[in-house]
Amino acid sequence: MKLIIVRHGDPDYEHDSLTEKGFREADYLAERLAKLEDVRGCYVSPMGRAKATAAPTLARTGWHWEQRPWLREFSAFILRPDAPDRRNVAWDWLPQDWTAVARFYDKDRWYEHPAMAEAGVGPEARWVAQGLDAVLAEHGYVREGQLYHAAAANGGTLVFFCHFGVECVMLWHLLGVSPMILWHGTSAAPSSVTTLISEERREGIAAFRMSGFGDISHLYAHGEPPSFAARFRELYANDWERRD
């Protein structure tokens, strides 16, 4: 089984849609995804920017698709230590704050930090994991502990159109890596493609291995530069790049 996780294109957050660049990215992405074989399911976030990203692919391929609420952007908002008077997304901390907390490196305890617990981050993450497991079970892979029982092993492909924050929560569940590390140590550019493939080294026991993360080769093929929306400024003095 192959899992394809797609981040939405360059976002127009104000209107929950895409920028002009984002719509170009979605078209180039569709050209790439249309070449996938044996797609057995396509799942789309209910948010506008994800649906706009999926639209050209769905029009080109005619895939059956379903909207799943747990694919929305990860929606637990916290009172971050450096900004205790306003709520921020759970997946954006200053490096000097999150790296000082040992439990953030623990896949089982990262959401126990008081700021995370107060905002209900743990239940939100488990909801995402349960939603993902329900989809995988529909296609023959049933969660058992940290692995999957390959009840109906297959070489099909599932495609998910979603968001960076929730993508890292999905990877936490599939790979056993704290999302705090993924949220802050990786950068999945808009319209990027992450690929995981099941491995069944013993019959009936499956795990997923990531063979590609945040790939944007479809943009480079068309001479389209990646969006900066995935990152913060490279140098503090770079005033033309995003700081917060």
Image: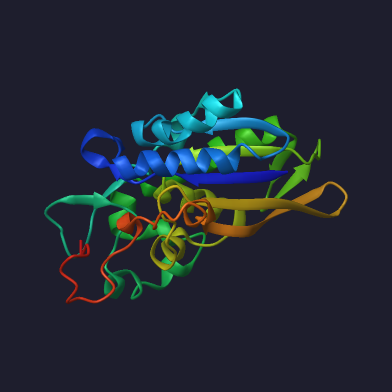
Q: Quadrant of residue 140?
A: top right
Residue at point 69%, 45% (across, down):
2
Q: Of all residues shown, which one is farthest toward the front?
A: 223
- Image coords of residue 132 (percent x, y): 57, 39
> Farthest residue toward the right?
203
Across and down, in percent, residue 112 comes to: 39, 58
Q: In screen coordinates, is 85 left or right of 141?
A: left
Tell me which colouring the rendered structure shows.
Answer: rainbow
Which quarter of the rendered picture does the N terminus lie within? top right
Q: Is residue 156 left or right of residue 100?
A: right
Screen quadrant of the C terminus? bottom left
User: What residue is shown at x 72% (from left), y 38% (from top)?
Assistant: 37
Which of 6/59 is in front? 59
In the figure, is residue 179 to the left or right of 48? Answer: right
Indicate the quadrant where residue 96 lies.
Answer: bottom left
Q: Position of residue 178 (x, y in %)?
A: 49, 62
Residue depicted at x 11% and y 54%: 85
> Residue 117's spot in the image, x, y percent?
33, 52
Asked whether residue 8 appears in the rendered view, the answer is no
Residue 136 lies, with reference to residue 77, above or below; the image says above
Q: Nearer the viewer, residue 48 or 241?
A: 241
Which of these two is toward me, 151 or 243?
A: 243
